Amino acid sequence: MRDWLIRQGHLIDYTLASLRRHGGRNLGLFVVYGLLVFALASLSLYAGALRSEAGLLLAGSPEVVLQRMVAGRHDLIPPGYLEGIGRIRGVQKKEARLWAYHPDPQSGAQLVFMARPASEVASGSVMVGAALAAAHGWQPGATLSFTDYRGQAYALQLASLLTPASRLQSAALVLVSEDDFRAFFGYPAGHYTDIALSVRNPAEVPNVASKLAAALPDARPIQRDEMLRTYEHIFDWREGVLLTLLAAAVLAFAIFAWQRAAGLSAEERREIGILKAIGWETGEVMRMKVWESLLLSLSAFAAGFLAAWVHVFQFGAPLFAPLLKGWSVSYPGFALTPAVAGLQLATLFFFTVFPYTAAVLVPIWRAAITDPDTVMR
């Protein structure tokens, strides 16, 4: 075992020297290789992080959200709307909710105002997400001024900052008391935005939704699983669009890598012939070239992946965010929580490192089994 490790160390030393001798050509391949890994890894990391944020956001959401529809548009829930159908079997809890969108003049984003009980948010107070507070320079205890539905200033004191598991959830969230909410938006008493229902048994959620739709013809029950599937389909579609745009770059790299691996130069053939002439075996020559391709591809993969990590989680992926987020223009900026799955990393590694490494085997084997004198001639 010790002799084998020593032999591999010598092969690596020779391989590194060979890479330095052909530095210009290998540098060009390294740059192209790294840029391809950077683009694919950025897309994969950003889409995966958004999926993770969406999963955290919806994990604590109610199993069914009931909305009232009038002329095909979402309308307010009137007093006694849900009580009219009585108790629904399987439903643990019903909560009438108050929430609304409100534009932020400073950032141009759409904030989400939501009313909470007095036990959580006192009248005259407000709670906002940490990302939103940082963007505006707000600190707990400060007095915030918003413009209400009449165009007048409405002052609220910042009680504390929200720190939920999902940064996506708190980036645009503003929590106020019910009294402040109704006064701010001019909501009539007894009316609500929608109704959230908690179902004890997840298997009963479709049945509960069907009962609600049958009992309330003007209602639209939305299941949590439907929202999750919608997020998945949106992210899959947008990721597919970007992959289609990158397909030309991937194809160009594949052709470039194949020509680089398959088309050995005269200098490389002569080098192989000299190695065979001084006693190198075919297996040793092939191992040396495999080490060369592995060192090059692994270095490019590591550099491209590291650059993608910085691009996504430090700078917010400015190259891909507008298309993948979709609502980036109307949503406050927020830092993504890194989320990398093992399968995600393995798939990226397989489709970038393995093809190039495998492509070098056939031409190297052909040159290695040829008579040294013939190769050098």
Image (cartoon, rainbow, N blue to C red):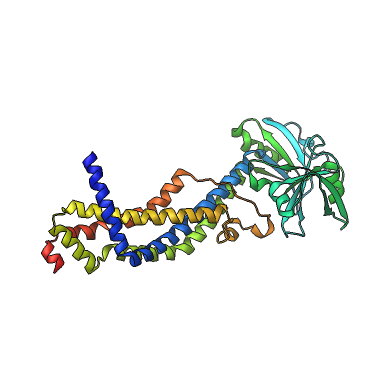
Task: Pinpoint residue 60: horizontal percent, then vertical percent.
Answer: 65, 38
Residue 26 shows up from this direction: yes
Residue 213 shows up from this direction: no
339 to the left or right of 77: left
Residue shown at the point (24%, 45%) measured from the top left: 6
Residue shown at the point (41%, 47%) measured from the top left: 346
Task: Pinpoint residue 280: horizontal percent, then vertical percent.
Answer: 16, 54
User: Is 332 rendered above or below residue 222?
Assistant: below
Nearest the viewer among 337 and 74 is 337
User: Is 343 rendered above or below residue 107?
Assistant: above
Nearest the viewer among 45 and 74 is 45
The image quarter containing residue 65 is top right
What quarter of the picture does the C terminus occupy?
A: bottom left
What quarter of the picture does the N terminus occupy?
A: top left
172 to the left or right of 246: right
User: Is 79 rendered above or below residue 329?
Assistant: above
14 to the left or right of 171: left
Nearest the viewer among 112 and 298 is 298
Task: Pinpoint residue 262: horizontal percent, then vertical percent.
Answer: 27, 63
The image quarter containing residue 36 is bottom left
